[in-house]
Amino acid sequence: MREGVAAKVDPTKLAEMTAAQRKAAETGLAKEAANLKGSGAKMGSIAAEGDPADAINTEATKVAETLIVISTHGRSGVGRWVMGSVTDKKVREANHATLVIRSAEGDVASAAPRISRVVLAVDGSETGERAISHAIEMAKALGTGITVLRAIPPTAFGDTFAEYVPAAYDDLYAEVEADAQQYASKIAQ
């Protein structure tokens, strides 16, 4: 719809469309719950109306120790701009631990890979360190190990001006690398 153009919506039609969407959601949820019944996990389902990110947040806040698991289509560029991203919004606004799964075309629930390692990315910030306890609990629950990683960002100009970088750059890089390794080792203890 173009900006400035109003459309009259028939309230009866709108109610019918909403009821049909709710029925389809409930039918889909019942089917998923039946498929997952043998997983050994306690199951429940809810069809919630409204903004998806807000509905997720509302449900998650009912229990403080909630892990939100959400997939992403991986849209980028114009697709992301036009379609938006519930996952992006949820991750930005999350007050709960959030696990984002990158979905590929044709993925199915039963094709989930076995997780054999948790990579804990840290950056030395207080915010980054909030992930440590979550990674530990997840690794314990999964029976896996943790690899602590601290990335060393490239220089602002990459190799563009490499021939002009002073010889001290190698020493500085080695110092930054040693600092990152020391920090990651400290977290790993």
Image: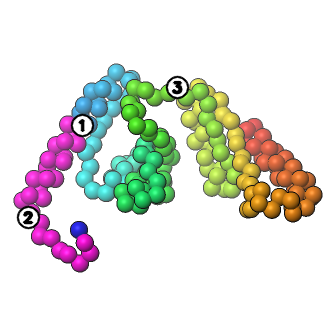
Query: What span is colored magenta in the figure?
Result: 2-27
Mark found first going from the N terminus, 2 or 1: 2
Residue 153: image x %, image y %?
72, 54
Q: Main secondary structure of the magenta part?
A: helix
Which residue is drawn at the image coordinates 65% and 29% (left, top)?
145
Q: Position of residue 15 (x, y in %)?
A: 11, 56
Tell me the element at label 3: loop
Query: Tag 1's secondary structure?
Result: helix
Q: How is the image coloured?
A: rainbow
The front one of 59 and 105 is: 105
Picture coordinates of residue 173, whole percent (x, y)? 84, 53
Query: How far separated are the C-alphas under marks 3 and 1?
Result: 26 Å
- Tell whether 75 sits left or right of 128: left
Instruction: State if disc 1 and disc 2 touch (CB < 8 Å).
Output: no
Q: Which mark is residue 28?
A: 1
Q: Which one is nearer the viewer's eye here, 51 or 139?
A: 51
Q: Which mark is residue 114?
A: 3
- 188 horizontally vs 177: left or right: left
Dot 1 surroundings within 10 Å: few (below 14), some, or many (20 or more)? few
- Crowd around label 3: few <14 · some 14–19 · many ≥20 (10 Å): few
Tell me the residue that label 2 is attached to.
Answer: 10
Q: Is residue 167 left or right of residue 69?
A: right
Residue beneath the point at 75% across and 37% down: 189
